[in-house]
Amino acid sequence: MKKLAIIIIALLPIFAFSQKNELMLGLSIGMGMPLGDFASNEYTIDETTNEFTPEGQFAKNGLAFDFSASYRLGYYAGFAGRIIGGTNKTENGIYSDAMTEILQVENPEHSVLASSKGWGNGGLMAGAYFVLPINDLYIDARFMAGYMVLFAPQIRYYIYETEEDLNNTDAFVRQKYSAGGFAYDIGLGIKYKFGGNKFLQVNGDYIGSKIVKDNIKTLNPFTQKEESIDMDIEYQNLTFTVGLGYMF
């Protein structure tokens, strides 16, 4: 993916046939849909060691937002950049069932309720921008690469015997931790110019990244002792956003 981004940027001047310098700035908000392993709810529990191994990250649909900029070097091409951010909720119910299954091996009378607000992400992208202008309508495609940070969710664990106990049960808290890495963004968009230089924009973007970091220091939520956690996540998110912008 890195080589593809370099080739596209290198070929960009070939497509910029005529000068049409134009800067577009936009702000959008919408929905992020996790894909692949990031969205998977699958897991395994070793019958011998009782070790929990998630195959996915239990991510659900969430919020996506971005600040975008594109600069046309010619009528058909230019450069683009995006500051992205968002959240993805977590599938608390399935995760709670998994934790309960582990706990009940030694404590069959107890259950676990896990509560989390979800994953967070933020990043910066830049790359090539191709546009087909049709009067006040602009159809564009973007191929960008950059860096993003993924924030693992804070998780609150409640251990209880009956649901009535939940009101009087203290939470064991797994604090947030984060890691970053190379990311890429492939996007399509439509912009409609109205009211002078203002425009309405609709975007769809596929964002991918491989987030790997070893020995992240954190506290065990149950013992409160320091421990190390490894993050190895194949991040995939499909975002759909709507917003407003201005042309200079």
Image (spheres, rainbow, N blue to C red):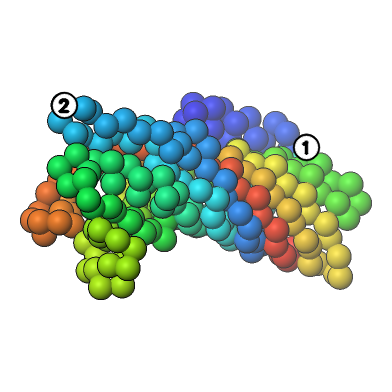
Q: Residue at x 28, y 46 (%)?
A: 100
- Residue 75 locus on image (x, y percent): 79, 44
- Residue 49 locus on image (x, y percent): 15, 30
Q: Nearer the viewer, residue 76 or 231?
A: 231
**Residue to which mark 1 is pinned:** 17
Residue 54 visible, this angle = yes
Q: Nearer the viewer, residue 46 or 105?
A: 105
Question: Disc 1 to disc 2, how far (Cα)?
Answer: 66 Å
Q: Residue at x 67, y 46 (%)?
A: 204
Quarter-of-image position of residue 53: top left
Residue 154 visible, this angle = no
Residue at the farthest bottom position: 168
Helix, strand or loop at disc 1?
A: loop
Q: Amino acid at mark 1?
A: Phe
- Residue 120 locus on image (x, y percent): 42, 56
Helix, strand or loop at disc 2?
A: loop
Q: Is residue 10 left or right of residue 169?
A: right
Establish if 15 lies above or below 191.
above
**Residue to which mark 2 is pinned:** 48
Q: Nearer the viewer, residue 35 or 95?
A: 95
Q: Residue at x 19, y 39 (%)?
A: 105
